[in-house]
Image: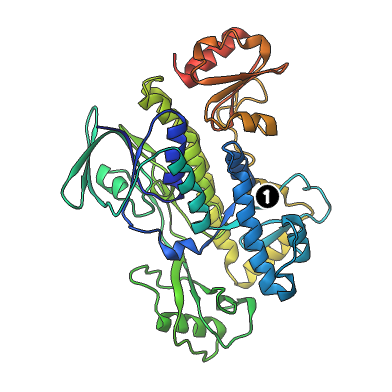
Amino acid sequence: MESVMIVGGGPVGLFLAAELALAGVTPLVVERLTEPDPRKGEDDRGITARTMRTLAARGLADATTALAEAAVRRLARLADPSLVDTPKDLPALLESLGMADVKGDFAMLPLVDRNGTMTDLSPPLMVLQGEFEEILACRVAELGVPVRRGVEVTAVAPGDDRVTVTLADGSEIETAWLVGCDGGRSTVRRCVGFDFPGTDPSMVARIAVADIDLAHGFQRLPTGMLAVAPPPAPSMTIEFDPDPTRDGELTAAEFEASLRRVSGTGVTVREIAAPTRITDNARQTSTYRRGRVLLAGDAAHVHSPIGGQGLNLGLQDAANLGWKLGLVAGGRAPESLLDTYTRERHPVGAEVLRNSRAETALLRTDPQIEALRALLAELPTQRHLVELMNGLHIRYEPGEHPLTGTFVDDPHALELLRAGRGLLLGGHLHETAAAWADRITTAGGEDGVLVRPDGYIAWAGTDPDGLRAALIRWFGP
């Protein structure tokens, strides 16, 4: 019997698999596709400042930054061909594109540091999902985690002490724990009976690579939004209150019809590549755990990808769940530790859905919304929105000490977390933590700080009894 089985071999499933392996539990990952989806592989994805710090805690930040530099270099090449061989680093590239002071966007409204009050905040880094997924796949392979592709799950039967998973070929796999990371149309979620309430689509974006006889650039028009770019860059239309169907692949005829409605011209489209549709369908299950079955990523919540929060939300789910499930599946912590997963991550997901709905509202192009956008653009500081989009305000279960529940930002501490263990800073408290030596790394420091493997501070203070209680709570007896 497997100890943990993960359904879904995308970025969230792979990152969760790596976290479990670091926690001493080798999961089995199964993925329906025989190869990564090429359409998603070429999608731009934003990696926020908080997620970059999580990746830094696993030694993956440098590789991710290199991908972002390559992505920005491609953008710079489109803007100015003379920049093809420019040996500029990421800050210099952003400066050459006039983006040095842009800290992100909200509903495609640039969040700009006009008065220098946000120099401590980094903008999201753009990477291609396929390239980022390769980094995670390499890490999983290094850790010896088996990934079986071309394996489709058709049924899930939870029991008191195990979960039986039926595959498309009729075979069965038994596992002590099952995690669904299988996307917005999750088979695991449906089979186990998780609810999925939310709001239906009110807009649809159609995206494809095509040679279009329209002026290049982005336009907000009374009929919607239009972004036209030369191949191989994709072009896009956004329409509101349309038929939001997602059945079948986007065709050249459908894309042409949308272009004509939005642009008001008789533009023709003969062929397209990399076609896709996205909507603002927003849903979230009310719990991320039912017995021995858990959900993470889009299986637990979906929303419009505009704003770039989806991948980060899923990766942070995996960071929160991985070490907890590893301790429980390894018999070192009680099952009650898993109850903190929903308690901590569900409010974060709900907030992202709220933000996503607000972005959709602000994307509309009627005169009232245009006036509101102009007003927001005039605000002297947009720091709150930047912190919101980067997840920098998240605090889990605050305690009496002001550090409790916050994320540790010290680079040295993040480096000490690379093994996926907890971390205790404070030499005078090491003896108290000696019994947890298999789960905790100890390091010097004057202040007592207990850091969870996901980088959040579980306890801070000087009282050994308080530390002992926190160790039992978060790392088992």
Let me know if residue 125 appears in the view: no
The x, y position of residue 91, in whole percent, is 75, 55
The x, y position of residue 405, in whole percent, is 60, 28
Q: Is residue 20 above or below residue 451?
A: below
Q: How is the image coloured?
A: rainbow
Let me know if residue 183 appears in the view: yes
Q: How many marks?
A: 1
Look at the image and tell me in which quarter the C terminus lies: top left
The x, y position of residue 78, in whole percent, is 66, 73
Furthest toward the left, the residue is 170
- Horizontal side of 168 relative to 415 (left or right) equals left
Q: Hey, what amino acid is under mark 1?
A: Val
Mark 1 crowd level (few <14, some 14–19, many ≥20, 10 Å Cα) = many
Furthest toward the right, the residue is 115
Local SS, label 1: helix
The x, y position of residue 126, in whole percent, is 61, 57
Could you say which is closer to the camera, residue 119 or residue 387?
Answer: 119
- Horizontal side of 240 relative to 379 (left or right) equals left
Q: Is residue 452 above or below residue 123?
A: above
Could you say which is closer to the camera, residue 196 or residue 43?
Answer: 43
Could you say which is closer to the camera, residue 162 or residue 220?
Answer: 162
> Which residue is painted at 58% across and 57% down in the image?
127
Look at the image and tell me in which quarter the N terminus lies: top left
> Which residue is painted at 63% across and 53% down in the image?
66
Q: Quadrant of residue 180?
A: top left
Kindly identify which residue carries mark 1. 386
- Horizontal side of 7 relative to 366 (left or right) equals left
> Which residue is painted at 33% across and 57% down in the image?
33
